Amino acid sequence: MAHLKPFRALRYDTRRAGPLETLVAPPHDVISPDLRDRLLAASPYNVVRLLHPDSPADAARALDAWKGSGVLVREIDPAVWLLEEEFPGPDGMPHTRRGLVVRIRLEPYAAGVVFPHERTVGRQREARLALLRAVRTKLSPVLLLHEGQPPEPTPGRPPELEVEFDGVTSRLWRITDPAERGRALARVRGAVIIADGHHRYETALRLHQEEGTAETAYLLAALVSRNDPGVVIFPTHRVASGRVPELNGRFHVTTLDGGAIEALDRLRRVPRDRPAFVVLRREGAVLAEADPERGPLGVLDTTALAQLPLEDVRYTPSAAEAERAVRSGSASAAFLVRAPTIEQVEAVALAGETMPEKSTYFFPKLTSGLLFAPLDE
């Protein structure tokens, strides 16, 4: 079982900092240069200055200055926070995802408490570690899935925090009563799987292994039940430059008519007991199907695609964006895949396996800038 604790959140005082809509951002890994510029222009206190600074030292100076001037204030009492996110799903219908924001004790993967499902990149871990050493604060929660039940119904009172950002409305209620906190935390059960934030988890674990203190032993996390109807996974398509590898001989190849929409419809009709993907080029599209390999990884589209030596790979959850890159000539090909199911993610993680990097896109990304957790508890 995961060990969970309430925490004394550090958060914006909007009377000094301005509206939350101008202060929040997505997690660092989806902040493009253009988006960073827009966030910087939105407010001198936007959290992007901490998540994506010019240097770790700049982030530390900004954080200290904001605390000193009252832009950021510290909660007096430790709390668990109930999080509710409303968003439009891929079907265009409204969805709601609910969970708890807490501190969770960091555990090595070998302990069998917290399981990854994707591989990470060393250079990203090193960059995040340098930032964490400088700010001594968990800036963004990691999204974790557990086997228990979703939280009880939303309290009959207005939330302490509410913000709409990029089409997602996030609401947070503070839970400070010990009995109420206990009931909320008791619904978290079983093994925990990292849905989003592998680099942040491994960075925090690395710092704790270096320092070994009680203050570094915990991670800021949003825990969501795998049974929550609001758990949505988008695919992560690949866009590549350079020569397109030969597919014949490795895959069963079928020529397709039409563009990305028609190709995705054909891809969706391939049984999920085998991997497949679509290759879009300016001259047309093909469907590539592979024979499944043994184990939970063997039926995943991204596992089959990882066999190809792609060059200058970029990632996007949008098939339309991938197709535009090919049509415009900024990419030689786009590789469209299906998102793994939640059952497939669970099977891979609990088997001790990891998917290729960027195999999943749990939607929506958690909004950063609502709650921070300093390393002093």
Image (cartoon, grey):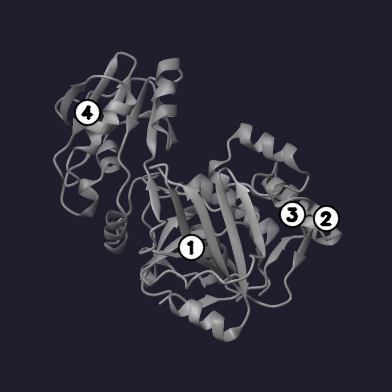
Crowding at dot 1, Cα within 10 Å, few <14 / some 14-19 / many 20+, comes out as many
What residue do we see at 32% from left, 23% from top?
A: 280
What residue do we see at 32% from left, 60% from top?
A: 349
Mark with earlier residue (3, 2): 2
Contact (CB < 8 A) between labels 1 and 4?
Answer: no
Location of mark 1 (residue): 98
Does any portion of residue 264 appear in the rendered image? yes
Position of 139 compared to 46: left or right? left
Nearest-to-viewer mark from 3 and 2: 2
Location of mark 2 (residue): 16
Position of 250 compared to 320: left or right? left
Q: Quadrant of the N terminus?
A: bottom left
What residue do we see at 48% from left, 63% from top?
A: 98
Residue type at mark 3? Ala
Q: Percent from the top left, x then y, of residue 133?
A: 65, 58
Q: Percent from the top left, x then y, of residue 317?
A: 42, 38
Location of mark 3 (residue): 60
Position of 40 compared to 180: left or right? right
Residue type at mark 1? Arg
Mark with earlier residue (3, 1): 3
